[in-house]
Amino acid sequence: MKLFLLERTDYIQWDMYISFIVCAEDEESAKNLMPGDDGEAVPFNKTNQYWVRSKSKIKCTELGTANEGIEQSIILSSFAS
């Protein structure tokens, strides 16, 4: 598993996620996740109001390899409130 930083490249308003770090197998798997209501990893949903509506608006940067035993999850998120 790898660690990825996902950042939005579109507008940012109040009550929106700015970025998050996710543990995933690859870049595509990382982009298929987003923070849910409680910050847990949920499948990407283009109708959500807190994250981007198009995967083309996501900048994905590989940060490194996750420690053994870490499962696919959101590690840390940044939310504008």
Image (spheres, helix red, strand yellow):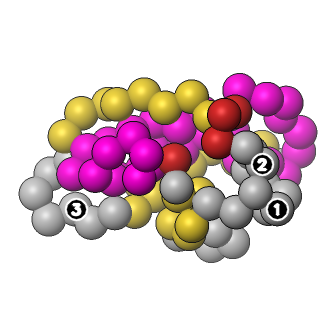
Q: Residues within 10 Å of mark 1 (few under 14, many from 20)?
A: few
Q: Disc 2 marks which amino acid?
A: Arg
Q: Is residue 46 left or right of residue 39?
A: right
The residue that appears at 10% across and 57% down in the rendered structure is: 68
Mark 2 or 3, nearer chain start: 2
Labels 1, 3: front one: 1
Helix, strand or loop status at disc 3: loop
Instruction: Give the residue pinned by disc 3.
Output: 70
| Label 2, label 1: how far apart the Cα atoms are | 6 Å
Viewer-proximal residue, 44 or 7?
44
The residue that appears at 79% across and 29% down in the rendered structure is: 10
| Label 2, label 3: how far apart the Cα atoms are | 28 Å
The residue that appears at 43% across and 46% down in the rendered structure is: 28
Mark 1 or 3, nearer chain start: 1
Q: Residues within 10 Å of mark 3 (few under 14, many from 20)?
A: few
Mark 2 or 1, nearer chain start: 1
Provide the residue span drawn in magenta.
1-30
Circles 2 and 1: CB distance less than 8 Å? yes
Q: Disc 1 marks which amino acid?
A: Thr
